[in-house]
């Protein structure tokens, strides 16, 4: 009887998963091997470890990231933000399906607002992207934003790395929504897309300049309610084009591209994704994408430095008493806080 190559490969994959699942979590290499077989349970467990706030979990999480990082770096990352009600989840579901139809594996990292009481996600994007979440070539993961600014969760970049190691070559990062610090998602994406609504008019005043000046693409959504809605979408687009025309493009970027359309129309979204993919291919060929990623890595290093410096001082044996004294003194004096903090840190040397 002739051998079935596909069946043999499938059996080998099952055996690798069985072997990896039988290993303890501490065996990071086997865990990463399990990730690379496409085991969703392994990926979900890895993400839970990365999101953990327990100090004892961090060394193992960092080891996992170090090994997984050897198999990452080839995916393209889209950052998607927009005003409330702009239809981000609907657009992402359509865009994800368009990418899958073109042979890609898509991971969606949807950052939800956090519950102040439990710290968990309030919305849960798996319920808002039901078709995409069920697709075998897609993975949808909602994460609570917590206290992190920038429209993303603290571990979003690390989770994206895990998804890349698991074989997803397109990562879609949906932010909480337009706000004062939403541009943080731009620091971890290859293309930053801004979704807006028709009837913008003076609404451009409500969009922070930081969002506009970093947008690589602008889509005015919901241009699907008849001639009046379409005219309103085009008018809004003209307003945003005018505003962006006054702002210089990013150092490693190109002028943004614009479109009106409806996330409910798969053909429109598919054509738009073709255009965005072509733009990323051009950026890669001209070296702009590599320049952007170098800048992102430098920003990431600065962020890690700040985090580790804070952790270093917080773990100093004299820090708790010094911090209590500083807070008590600050309540009784008018000395600027930065002077007192510097004085406290010098005392810990």
Image: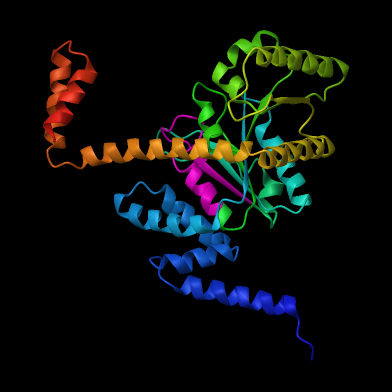
Q: Is residue 305 above or below residue 46?
A: above
In the figure, residue 148 lies in which quadrant?
top left
- Residue 82 appears in the picture as rendered: yes
Outermost residue to the right: 227
Residue lying at the far bottom of the rendered structure: 1
Residue nearest the viewer, comparing 302 with 19: 302
If the image is split into quadrants, where does the C terminus sit?
A: top left
Query: Where in the figure is residue 28, as x and y percent of width and height?
Result: 43, 65
Closer to the camera, 191 or 228?
191
Residue positioned 76% across, 14% down in the render:
238
Specify the quadrant of the image occupied by residue 251. top right
Number of marks drawn: 0
Q: Is residue 171 above or below residue 288?
A: below
List the single residue furthest toward the top: 202
Residue closest to the eye, 154 or 86? 154
User: In the rendering, at what x and y percent does residue 229 appear?
Assistant: 81, 18
Identify the residue at horizontal 80%, vertical 17% (top origin).
234
Q: Is residue 310 left or right of residue 1?
A: left
Q: Visible in this render: residue 121?
A: no
Residue 49 location (% of width, % of height): 42, 54
Residue 154 on the magenta span: yes
The residue under the point 53% across, 27% down is 182
In magenta, the rendered stretch is 139-163
Q: Is residue 266 above or below residue 207?
A: below
Q: Residue sitting at 61 percent across and 57 percent down?
A: 167
Give the farthest residue toward the front. 286
Render colour scheme: rainbow
Query: Percent from the top left, x then y, of residue 141?
Result: 56, 47
Quadrant occupied by the N terminus: bottom right
In reply to whether residue 84 is colored magenta, the answer given is no
Q: Is residue 60 above or below residue 96?
A: below
């Amino acid at each position: 009887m002739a051998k079935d190559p596909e069946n043999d490969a499938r059996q080998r994959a099952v055996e690798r998963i069985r072997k990896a699942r039988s290993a303890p979590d501490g065996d990071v290499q086997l865990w990463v091997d399990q990730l690379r077989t496409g085991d969703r349970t392994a990926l979900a467990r890895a993400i839970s470890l990365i999101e953990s706030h327990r100090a004892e979990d961090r060394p193992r999480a960092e080891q996992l990231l170090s090994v997984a990082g050897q198999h990452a770096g080839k995916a393209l990352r889209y950052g998607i933000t927009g005003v409330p009600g702009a239809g981000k989840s609907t657009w992402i579901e359509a865009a994800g399906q368009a990418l899958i139809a073109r042979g890609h594996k898509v991971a969606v990292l949807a950052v939800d607002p956090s519950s102040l009481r439990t710290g968990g996600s309030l919305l849960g994007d798996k319920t808002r992207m039901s078709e995409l979440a069920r697709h075998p070539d897609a993975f949808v993961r909602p994460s609570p934003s917590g206290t992190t600014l920038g429209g993303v969760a603290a571990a979003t970049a690390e989770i994206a790395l895990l998804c890349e190691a698991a074989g997803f070559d397109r990562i879609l990062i949906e932010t909480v929504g337009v706000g004062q610090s939403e541009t943080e998602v731009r620091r971890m994406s290859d293309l930053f897309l801004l979704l807006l609504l028709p009837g913008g008019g003076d609404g451009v005043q409500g969009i922070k300049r930081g969002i506009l000046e970093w947008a690589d693409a602008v889509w005015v959504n919901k241009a699907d309610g008849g001639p009046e809605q379409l005219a309103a979408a085009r008018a809004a687009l003209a307003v945003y084009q005018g505003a962006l025309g006054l702002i210089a493009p990013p150092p490693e970027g190109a002028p943004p591209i614009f479109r009106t359309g409806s996330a409910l129309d798969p053909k429109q979204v598919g054509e738009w994704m073709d255009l965005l993919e072509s733009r990323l291919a051009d950026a890669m060929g001209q070296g702009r994408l590599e320049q952007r990623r170098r800048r992102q890595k430098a920003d990431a290093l600065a962020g890690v430095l700040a985090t580790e410096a804070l952790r270093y001082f917080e773990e100093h044996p004299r820090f708790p008493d010094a911090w209590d004294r500083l807070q008590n003194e600050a309540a009784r004096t008018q000395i600027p806080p930065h002077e007192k903090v510097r004085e406290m840190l010098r005392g810990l040397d």
